[in-house]
């Protein structure tokens, strides 16, 4: 199974499970969780089931294309099920079967791993899923997002696609993964890894990054004031990306790090709060049962 | 007699939760059953990653009957002079639907009261158990509970099924939207899936047939056996750490051990770098040959049977090789630069916001270490101590420690050897972190010991100086553990270092401090006092009180003196010496400040005897002190026991003649003061 078939199979599987299949979000982010489809949709009472492939950037993980297992740009396959269904683990295991992994022929385990994203004011409990000792999936029940308790709780399933593909195709390096039957992952991304690593570690202009961070931060704040939460959140994502870039450049001391994280977290919290308010204002339109919708809406309005 | 089976089916429970949860279940079920007056023979618990189970054997069919006493009004209010019930009496009986025949009179205080003895017939346990089990399940606590789905219930992980069987009867109740039933589940991928239980006693057998070993000790024994078998077949020895085994036992329902291998080239890495990913990240057991040499194999444990185990083995090998190749990459990269250059990088690593960078810390530690070296006058090479001090924190900025933080110190040690530093310098780097727990191993070398003291004292003084204190359960900088470490090293090595002098030196090195030198010393000494008491807890509290009152800040001396006093306590004349000493001490407090002892004023026999004996022992006593022979010092001092007590029996101290009085007080004061540098004997219990 080549890389694009793997993605197609997952899309197909989760589509059959009733998920919206989203396309990637067009702003840099460190993880699929930061996509508003996860971070914002996890808030409030409206149900949402979605799956999507997400390109992720982690500038500090760049290795100039020399390390077979680490990339600064890679793909996650992200599934969000809200509320988390009772048989969520079984559905997940079925998805592995769908991509050709028969659990009876392997050792699949759910090993405790709790997730926390300080810049998002978010945390959850769950596992990393091991396939013969290799972590292939992060499985999380969201407990808080942007400092707000999640109710109902969303179940988040994040597949590490490159890891899965090296396993399925039995290759030792991510660069050897067949993307389709003609070209490898390396054919497509090796040059990108080399050049981006150089940029991240050596060429990125620290002063520029710092000003960009501040500019986007100011923009986010003014958009929050204007109650335009979706554009505001995009600006917060920009801040998070430039923070990661500054980190890769080694331009952030330990003290400054805490301060930067605090600034991004403040924006995330504001966005979360503002998003929930905006959904209340819209009357939680995704709750399709009219009686339930009215009842829940009243509860929220009372709390306000 | 009946058997109860109660199984909570879960999504995978964190391994570390298992034992605390089972303990809670045992304690709480015992007290719930006792409170409900239900007799039973035995409580058993089982657990796998997907279930926690309570079995109660020999359960009574019914609750025990109990007699409840209901107290009514006093007899003289309930029954009138004609022996008839009053309104109050009738009211009491009506309330409990009783008649006068049921009443018993009991005397309370000086009058009789009406009592009803209400016999409560115990209910069938099948009626009582459902609410009792609901209560049990909701009373369980977890360090980090979670919510799931649309429920408000919190538990360790989502609850997916509940089995509640009393012999063959289902106990009807619901928890977290799950209805109790007689259905359990097999191994996730093996066995028949959903399993129906006919009787509580079938539990273990049905599960075992379906690839679940619910008994933890059985799983552990099986894993041990499998490891032993593999060891024999391959003639190697597995490194089985208890915490790894405990975790592995609670990560599987049906264990099958297997052997994997990796390229022997990775063995050129330091052992710890090879062992850490295997043991701590992948939960494998590394293996050694007879000579203790690490081998390129590992033992893993699969959750399942032997079918397709070659896939599992190959997969695990691949994961390990990826980790080892990362480690190799870091090792080669790190060693391209001299170790000292990593110390330079510490300039941009903040130790603590108010205190400054790690680089500043390293510089202070070096100065403090050299100060200790000079105070100890030992045969070490000063230059080497200085070099080691500069390197102790260098590895914190290497890629290897960034990747494997638990290897701090060890990496510095190995890198120093790789870059041809002398062995004692390299060893001091890893040893300076020791002891890593309150009763952990101490550094073996003097270089390591000195650096450990210097680093820890700097941490404590610098943190206290900016107001970072340990309070209650909060001790984020582990100040308590580090103080205990210092105390243990000082005592173990008998380093005669004066803590106050070291503190003052350390204080002067700090750039930011919120307290004066004196204020901080008081706090520090108080902080150390508590830790000294805990390290020396083999000695009784009064011994420690008396020793700590001496204003002696040489901690190793305090330990020797405490030991001497404890030994001295069993001497024959101990308690009579202490009685006499306490009297002397009380009077000595009244001595005139400006009056010194004048031997020409001594007239009476027993004051002269006391004075002469005091003079006679004086210089030997001082000699013993100077030679740290504390028991001998106490012994010779105790020869004053007889003259002191004779003095009190025969000499009147508080006489009218002021000169004579003051002279006698001065004599007592001199004797009391003689031993004060050793300990305050007045604090000892006789």
Image (cartoon, rainbow, N blue to C red):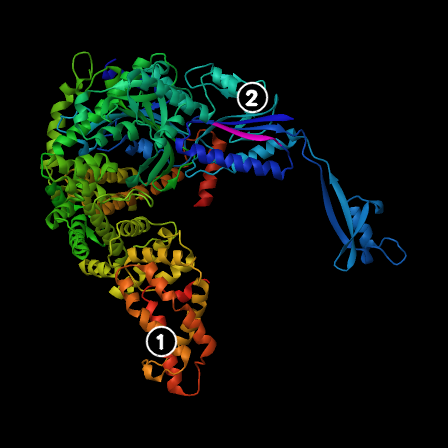
Give the percent coordinates (x, y) of residue B398: 16, 38
| Residue B358 or residue A152, whichever sits in front | B358
Is A26 placed above or below B615 here?
Answer: above
Q: Position of residue A66 (x, y in %)?
A: 13, 26
Answer with mark 1 or mark 2, whichever residue precedes in sequence. 2
- Residue at numbered disc 2: B182
Q: Tell me which residue sits at (30%, 14%) in the image.
A: B311
Q: Nearer the viewer, residue A95 or B61?
A: B61
Residue B611, numbered label: 1
Mark 2 belongs to which subunit?
B
Main secondary structure of the magenta stretch: strand
Q: Residue furthest bottom?
A: B657
Q: Does the segment drawn in magenta span residue B666?
A: no
The answer to which image quadrant residue A242 occupies is top left
Q: Secondary structure at mark 2?
A: loop
Q: On the rendered structure, is A212 left or right of B236?
A: left
In this orientation, which residue lies closer to the viewer: B9 or B471? B471
User: Is residue B52 shown to the viewer in this render?
Assistant: no
Foreground mark, 1 or 2, reads 1
Q: Residue at x 16, y 47 (%)?
A: B389
């Amino acid at each position: 199974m080549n890389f694009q078939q793997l993605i197609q199979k997952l899309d197909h599987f989760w589509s059959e499970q009733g998920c919206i299949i989203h396309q990637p979000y067009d702003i840099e982010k460190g993880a699929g969780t930061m996509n508003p489809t996860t971070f914002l949709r996890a808030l409030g009472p409206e149900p949402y089931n979605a799956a999507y492939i997400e390109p992720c950037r982690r500038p500090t993980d760049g290795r100039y294309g020399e390390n077979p297992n680490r990339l600064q740009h890679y793909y996650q396959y992200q599934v969000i099920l809200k509320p988390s269904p009772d048989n969520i683990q079984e559905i997940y295991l079925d998805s592995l079967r769908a991509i050709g992994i028969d659990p009876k022929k392997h050792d699949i385990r759910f090993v405790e791993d709790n997730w926390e994203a300080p810049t998002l004011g978010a945390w959850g409990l769950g596992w990393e899923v091991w396939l013969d000792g290799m972590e292939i999936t992060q499985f999380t029940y969201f407990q808080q997002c942007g400092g707000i308790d999640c109710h109902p709780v969303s179940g988040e399933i994040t597949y590490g696609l490159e890891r899965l593909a090296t396993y399925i195709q039995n290759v030792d390096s991510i660069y050897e993964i067949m993307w389709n039957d003609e070209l490898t992952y390396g054919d497509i991304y090796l040059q990108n890894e080399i050049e981006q690593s150089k940029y991240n570690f050596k060429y990125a202009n620290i002063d520029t990054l710092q000003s960009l961070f501040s500019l986007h931060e100011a923009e986010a704040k003014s958009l929050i004031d204007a109650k335009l939460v979706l554009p505001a959140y995009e600006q917060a994502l920009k801040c998070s990306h430039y923070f990661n870039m500054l980190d890769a450049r080694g331009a952030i001391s330990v003290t400054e790090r805490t301060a930067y994280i605090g600034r991004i977290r403040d924006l995330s919290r504001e966005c979360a709060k503002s998003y929930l308010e905006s959904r209340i204002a819209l009357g939680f339109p995704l709750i399709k049962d009219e009686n339930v919708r009215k009842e829940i809406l009243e509860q929220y309005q009372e709390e306000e | 007699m009946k058997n109860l089976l109660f199984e909570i089916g879960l999504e995978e429970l964190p391994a570390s939760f298992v034992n605390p949860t089972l303990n809670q279940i045992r304690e709480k079920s015992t007290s719930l059953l006792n409170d409900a007056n239900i007799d039973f023979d035995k409580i058993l618990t089982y657990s796998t990653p997907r279930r926690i189970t309570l079995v109660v054997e020999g359960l009574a069919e019914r609750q025990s009957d109990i007699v409840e006493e209901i107290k009514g009004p006093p007899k003289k209010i309930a029954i009138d002079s004609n022996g008839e019930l009053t309104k109050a009496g009738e009211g009491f009986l009506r309330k409990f639907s009783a008649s006068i025949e049921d009443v018993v009179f009991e005397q309370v205080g000086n009058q009789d009261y009406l009592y009803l003895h209400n016999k409560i017939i115990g209910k069938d346990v099948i009626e009582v158990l459902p609410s009792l089990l609901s209560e049990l399940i909701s009373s369980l606590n977890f360090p980090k509970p979670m919510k799931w789905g649309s429920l408000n219930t919190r538990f360790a992980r989502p609850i997916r099924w509940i089995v509640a069987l009393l012999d063959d009867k289902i106990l009807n109740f619901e928890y977290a939207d799950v209805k109790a039933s007689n259905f359990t589940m097999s191994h996730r991928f093996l066995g028949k899936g959903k399993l129906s239980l006919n009787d509580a006693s079938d539990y273990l057998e049905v599960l075992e047939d379906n690839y679940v070993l619910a008994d933890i000790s059985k799983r552990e024994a099986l894993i041990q056996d499998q490891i032993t078998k593999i060891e024999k077949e391959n003639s190697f020895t597995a490194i089985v750490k208890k915490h790894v085994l405990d975790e592995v036992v609670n990560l599987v329902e049906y264990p099958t051990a297997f052997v994997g291998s990796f390229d022997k080239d990775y063995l050129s890495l330091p052992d710890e770098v090879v062992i850490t990913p295997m043991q701590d990240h992948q939960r494998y057991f590394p293996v050694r040959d007879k000579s203790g040499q690490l081998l390129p194999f590992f033992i893993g444990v699969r959750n399942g049977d032997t079918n397709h185990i070659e896939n599992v083995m190959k997969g695990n090998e691949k994961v390990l090789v990826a980790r080892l190749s990362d480690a190799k990459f870091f090792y080669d990269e790190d060693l391209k630069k001299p170790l000292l250059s990593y110390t330079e990088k510490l300039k941009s690593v903040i130790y603590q916001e108010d205190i400054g960078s790690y680089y500043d810390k390293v510089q202070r530690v070096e100065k403090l270490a050299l100060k200790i070296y000079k105070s100890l006058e030992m045969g070490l090479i000063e230059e080497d101590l200085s070099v080691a001090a500069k390197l102790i924190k260098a590895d914190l900025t290497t890629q290897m420690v960034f990747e494997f933080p638990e290897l701090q110190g060890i990496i510095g040690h190995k890198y120093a050897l790789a870059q041809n530093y002398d062995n004692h310098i390299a060893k001091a780097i890893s040893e300076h972190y020791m002891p890593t727990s309150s009763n952990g191993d101490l550094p073996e070398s003097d270089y390591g010991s000195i650096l450990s003291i210097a680093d820890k004292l700097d941490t404590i003084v610098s943190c206290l100086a900016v107001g970072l204190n340990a309070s209650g359960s909060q001790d984020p900088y582990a100040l308590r553990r580090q103080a205990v470490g210092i105390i243990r090293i000082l005592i173990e090595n008998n380093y005669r270092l004066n803590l106050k002098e070291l503190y003052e030196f350390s204080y002067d090195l700090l750039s930011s401090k919120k307290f004066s030198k004196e204020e901080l010393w008081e706090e520090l000494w108080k902080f150390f006092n508590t830790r000294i008491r805990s390290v020396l807890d083999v000695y009784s509290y009064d011994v420690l009180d008396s020793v700590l009152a001496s204003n002696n800040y040489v901690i190793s001396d305090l330990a020797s003196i405490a030991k001497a006093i404890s030994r001295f306590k069993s001497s024959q004349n101990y308690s009579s010496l202490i009685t006499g000493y306490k009297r002397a001490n009380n009077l000595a407090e009244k001595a005139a400040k400006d009056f010194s002892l004048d031997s020409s004023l001594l007239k009476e026999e027993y004051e002269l005897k006391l004075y002469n004996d005091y003079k006679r022992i004086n210089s030997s006593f001082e000699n013993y002190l100077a030679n740290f022979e504390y028991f001998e010092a106490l012994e010779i001092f105790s020869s004053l026991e007889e003259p002191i007590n004779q003095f009190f029996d025969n000499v009147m101290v508080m006489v009218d003649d002021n000169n004579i009085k003051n002279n006698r007080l001065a004599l007592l004061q001199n004797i009391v003061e003689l031993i004060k540098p050793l300990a305050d004997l007045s604090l000892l219990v006789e």
